[in-house]
Amino acid sequence: MSLETIDSWVSHGGRQGVYAHPSSATGTNMTFSVFVPPHREGTRLPVLFYLSGLTCTHTNVTEKGEFREACAKAGIVFVAPDTSPRGEGVPDDNKGHWDFGLGAGFYVDATQKPYDRHYRMWTYVTEELPAFVAEHFPVDLAAASIMGHSMGGHGALVAALREPGKWRSVSALAPIVHPMKVPWGKKAFELYLGEDEQDWRAYDAVALIEDGARRGEMLVDVGTEDPFLHDQLCPEALEAACGGAGIALNLRRQSGYDHSYYFISSFMADHVGWHAQRLKGSA
């Protein structure tokens, strides 16, 4: 499958690029960014996938995430995909809602028309993109971790719970932990997956844990001044589920922080370092 380089810059001794490729999962071209740190020719590096939140593209974290210095020091490749398929013929929300459709794929494989043809973000981010990145960049998929913000935190937690052997570690910033019980998730799941809530449970971190999914430790940060904290994020639901299942959750409530990239960038280096310890087997 062909790789198109859209732009490329030297940064922290490595290279930050933006790329596109035709996706068989979504039936569209998909854009993503990759930071490759300085490394010895011929070596394969650990890789950290970052899933973004509602309304975002790869651009938000690439320009505002402040991850490159930490990734360069740790020797970690950082990959940031888009949040939904885009392009001619890709259906959007016909009522103009900002929290569904383009920019809001929720990292599910849609089963309902007209979304089932293109909105297959689960397959894209967990199967197609990692394989494509490994083909074109010096990454070792045996040392892969995943993290995300908000809707992307939801996607990262679900990926790590459903496929614990694929991801060495998982962390999230302000994640939607119980989407089937909050307004953002209910809207998306009904339109993408249908009205049967049993079908929603495969894409809900709390429900997955209730249904027996297990993995090692998880790191989650939330801001105490996040306007979505209580009605959309509900970290206490994840805390209760992990406590009941014996999963080591490090839930940190960061005083004064909100939902923005001011919050994300403040803790990004900490998350990269946490993943680096586990990717390199020193934790």
Image (cartoon, grey):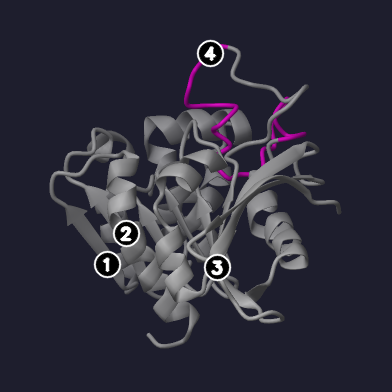
Instruction: Return the residue at label 2.
Output: 220
| Horizontal side of residue 50 vs 183, given as left or right | right
In terms of secondary structure, where does tag 2 sit?
Answer: strand
Q: Are marks 4 and 3 in contact (CB under 8 Å)?
A: no
Q: Mark 1 and 2 residues: CB-CB less than 8 Å, in contact?
A: yes
Residues shaded magenta: 95-118
- Residue designated by label 3: 37
Mark 4 or mark 3: whose residue is earlier in sequence? 3
Image quadrant in which the C terminus is located: bottom left
Disc number lying in front (1 or 3): 3
**Where residue 251 sits in the image (x, y, percent)?**
25, 61
- Give the SS element for disc 4: loop
Quarter occupied by the N terminus: bottom right
**CA distance for labels 2 and 4:** 31 Å
Mark 4 or mark 3, which is nearer to you? 3
Q: Which residue is mark 4?
A: 96
103 magenta-colored: yes
Q: Which residue is mark 1?
A: 250
Residue type at mark 3: give it. Pro
Q: Residues within 10 Å of mark 1 (few under 14, many from 20)?
A: some
Q: Earlier in the sequence, mark 1 or mark 2?
A: 2
Of label 1 and label 3, which has the lower sequence position? 3
Residue at image x 47%, y 34%?
A: 54
What's the mark number on residue 201?
A: none
